[in-house]
Image (cartoon, rainbow, N blue to C red):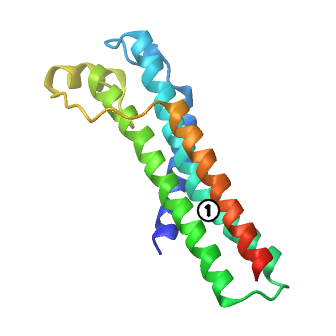
Amino acid sequence: MLEIVLLIVGIFKAFQRPKLKRLKAENFPTVDPQKFTTWHDAQIAATDVFLGVTWGALFIKLLLLLTLSGTRYSAETGIGITVAILVLWVIGLLIAAGFSSKAKKLRNEVGIVWPAAGPQTQAQSMQTRQFTTTPPVASRTKMLRLLFILIGIVLLFIIGLLLKG
């Protein structure tokens, strides 16, 4: 059920992404262009990772269902595959949350109101906004490296279960 909710949220994020992609530093005159670019890149990365995780999990499940529908495998193998996909999905969501926290921290530091705020709202929000900080997040490279290692481990686990069962 949670996966369906996240899939629907992903649809909204997918529709929001082109608007985010079109944003330029000129839309936020009170924000330093370099800081805007840093936030903009982090926000796009957070959106992409979230979409990749939520839609990727659904794609993997559908692919496995189509691939394994004609084969006989034990209940143990089916449970193992389900657990492996669930673990990978949760880890991916945690990584997406890390990217999102980084983007939120940058957004709060420079005073950007996102989504759906125009330049006039930006100027007003800079006067009334209280800045908060979030805990630092590991670098993008380290997080992506960890994600690829975990994907490899889970895929090896799934292959092992398939060969065993």
Q: Is residue 56 left or right of residue 123?
A: right
Secondary structure beneath label 1: helix
Quick one: label 1, few (<14), some, or many (20+) residues within 10 Å? Answer: many
Q: Which residue is mark 1?
A: 57
Residue 136 makes an appearance in the image:
yes
Please give left or right for residue 135 compared with residue 156 in the image: left
**Where's residue 37, x and y in %?**
47, 18
Front residue (pair 163, 111): 163
Percent coordinates x, y for residue 101 in the rendering:
36, 39
Can you say which quadrant of the picture contains the C terminus? bottom right
**Residue type indicated by callout 1:** Ala
Compared to residue 146, the image places residue 137 above or below, namely above
Query: Percent position (x, y) of residue 36?
Result: 42, 18
Residue at 45%, 13% in the rendered image: 26
Q: Residue at x 68, y 81 (%)?
A: 77
Q: Is residue 154 above or below residue 67?
A: above
